[in-house]
Amino acid sequence: MARHPRDVPDKIQQAAASAWSKWQRKIDSEPRPEKSHEDFVAHARYVDPDAGKSPRQRMIEKIRRRMQEFPEWYEADPEKMAASVSAHLERIGEILDRELPDAKDPVEVWQIPLSVFNWLVETDEGESFVHGALSAWSSAENFNAANAPGLDPQQRAKLRAPFLDLAPMLLTAVLDEMLQADLWISFAEKFVGPELKYLVMRVQRPVE
């Protein structure tokens, strides 16, 4: 029989078995402690705090942590949200005023955590969540496609709509204002290691 490339060669396998066998016999001879289900769950939680929790519970708690880490993205007070939107537009305006006139490439103005596209909702079954981060990038690609020359306003709005539906209020409010200007706004990916962590908002002059 042909050996799979992942298979360990016989010589190495035999040496490993010889070295491990005495420890295997010793471990197998030890009586296993009897634990109740409650003891098992308690022990598992000591090793992993999320053990015993459903995927739904884990996601809800993860979003709660993000709400504490990035409070401005989840702000419910209209006055505080308005102040945050104004502050970001001022900040972006200053960057563009300084960098856009001489820019040959899109100007990066905002690094947005992908996780803020997830938020909590109340349902008939209690607290749940919207996992918008799963489709944030694919929707951002459609948003970017709205910059293509030759599209009419309705076509551009249709391409941007899915992303704006997913975006947090802070981002939506900023975009609603900036999209009225003669600018191309797009998003790029930013990875931390192998994981997509941020969407980077970029601005440029329309290409003639």
Image: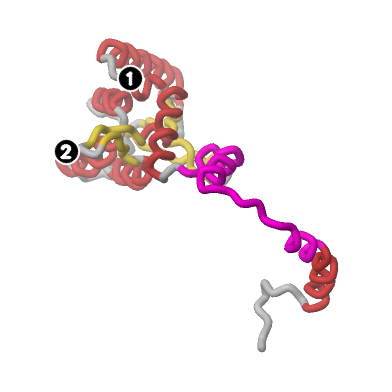
Q: Which residue is mark 1?
A: 75
Q: Position of residue 20 (x, y in %)?
A: 80, 65
Q: What residue sits 23% from the left and 44% below the top?
A: 159
Query: Is residue 106 among the parts visible in the rendering?
Result: no
Q: Which residue is mark 2?
A: 153
- Circle 1: residue type: Glu
The picture places residue 113, in percent across and down from the top left corner, at 44, 32
125 to the left or right of 133: left
**Quadrant of the rendered image containing residue 99:** top left
- Residue 81 in the magenta stretch? The answer is no
Most frequent secondary structure within the magenta stretch: helix
* Boundaries of the magenta span: 23-52
SS label for mark 1: loop
In this rendered view, identify the residue nearer to me: 80 or 39.
39
Q: Which is more toward the observer, 94 or 139? A: 139
- The 10 Å Cα crowd at callout 2, few under 14, some 14 to 19, many 20 or more, is few
